[in-house]
Image (cartoon, rainbow, N blue to C red):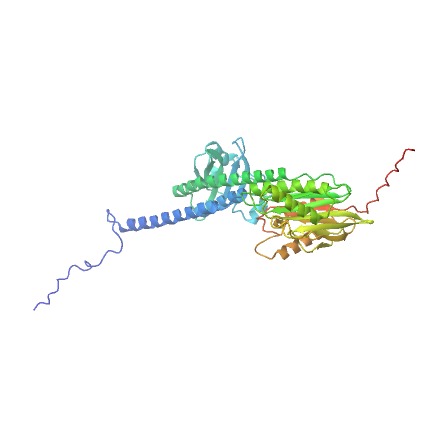
Amino acid sequence: MTSGAEPAGPPGAAEPPECPVAPDGRPEDAAEQLRALARAKDRLQGLLSAVLAIGGDLELPVVLHRIVTTAMDLVGARYGALGVLDSSGDRLERFVTAGLTEEERAALAGVDFPHGRGVLGHLIRHPEPLRVDDISSHPASVGFPPGHPPMRTLLGVAITVRGEIYGDLYLSERADGRPFDADDEEIVRALAGAAGIAIENARLFGYMRDGAEQFQRLLLPTLPNLVPFTGAAVYRTAAEPAGVGGDWYDAAVLPDRACAAVIGDVVGHDLQAAAAMAQARNMLRALLFDRRTPPSSVLTQLDHTVGAITDLPVTTVCLARIEPSGDGWSLHWSSAGHLPPLVVTPDGRARYLDAEPGIPLGIDPAVHRPDHTRPLPAGATVVLFTDGLVEDPARPIDEGLDALAALAAAHAALPLDDLVRLLADRHPSDGHDDMAVLAIRLPAAPLPAPPPAPPTNTPPR
């Protein structure tokens, strides 16, 4: 009696193979091909991530360092460097390194960076990809300086920007101890192509920022002689590519012996803001010399005048007059929505003159603006500044104001030019807005009274 089941075949005939079989009957070859494809996919993904990483910054020093570290990660190199060629193209003028330990850097202290001799010079003269399994045996090798860490292998690739060789990317010592191979060369060459674009973008950003800053500086005044006062100012452009902004300042000694000081900030970071800033500053200076009125009246007239002749964006301003008062001085000021003045005394105390601010310009010129007056000690410094110096969206503005006051108090004895630069250099803000600082220092002694007017001779009748 039969069961109807098919007869069994040879043992194992119904079992599938453990892996694909290659044409030559070696299944391990197919498995290796799959592993190679997986590695290639991982490398391609790594390359794409690397391209995004080096293109994410616009500051040239940051971009150059990231190119080096990204290339090291792609091929597993322990050391990396990027040499930037000088204008002649014959030698290196800059050398960005990565991978050196603190001890290795200390051992190289006092040793000048490479300028393009030896194997590095070979790559400069012959800008084709270079792989070296033993640096010391290469015909161009001239050895290493004292204290240099031992390096045996090298992979060098040129970086081109706008059709010209910008520099060379160098990698040394794979983590697995093996020499660099053709796959390493291929992926680093691909990265070098993307690096050229990232470098060009960073250079263009630098040109734009420098041009914007230069344009802004041309619109801002050079402070005149303020004797018997001392004045200093500094302006720093925003970190954004369109760095033209609306921050401005001005100061002048007026015919009544008062020193006028003003700081302002037009909303916006574009040419319109810069043009409005220039119009407001020029008009305000004319009003200051023409009208010996309280600061609030001058700001109101400025609001009416500029609003009548141009579409003025919202603008904050602090206008102050340092006036003779008996045998001393007083500060007479009015604010149009601006931050308060900071007064720093010679003994290292700093305080803000908090008082009611008026509304900014460009909203409603009919709204009343308050005036405020405070006495000032001899030798005091009045600091006016824009919000870019203290603002950081990650924390309350009061923290930035407190940090600025502490910084100014700690350096109250500095010469005025040094003080304003220090405040701008060590600002407590996040640095993403343009900033202006204006400081006026009072004489160390009261101003002598003006001589009496000479008598007039009336002719006899």
| Residue 359 to residue 145: above or below | below
**Pick the front one: 176 or 223:** 223
Quarter placement of the C terminus: top right
The residue lying toward the viewer, choosing from 23 and 268, is 268
Residue 134 lies, in percent from the top left, at 45, 40
Considering every residue shown, the one lying at the far bottom of the view is 1
Can residue 76 be spotted in the picture? no
Q: Where is residue 27 drawn, in percent x and y?
A: 27, 51
Residue located 44% across and 45% down the image: 51
Which quadrant would the N terminus be assigned to in this image?
Answer: bottom left
| Horizontal arrangement in the rendering, residue 396 relative to residue 259 (left or right) | left
Q: Is residue 120 visible?
A: yes
Q: Camera-side residue: 210 or 246?
A: 246
The single residue placed furthest to the left in the displayed view is 1
- On the picture, is 25 further left or further right than 143? left
Q: Residue 366, how many percent across, how many down?
A: 64, 51
In the image: residue 199, left or right of residue 230: left
* Vertical comparison of 405 with 453: above or below: below
Above or below for 20 versus 6: above
Outermost residue, front side: 461
Q: Which residue sits at x=26%, y=52%? A: 20
Q: Residue at x 70, y 48 (%)?
A: 297
Q: How many marks?
A: 0
x and y percentages locating residue 93 in the rendered image = 55, 36
Give whichever of 417, 362 is nearer the camera. 362
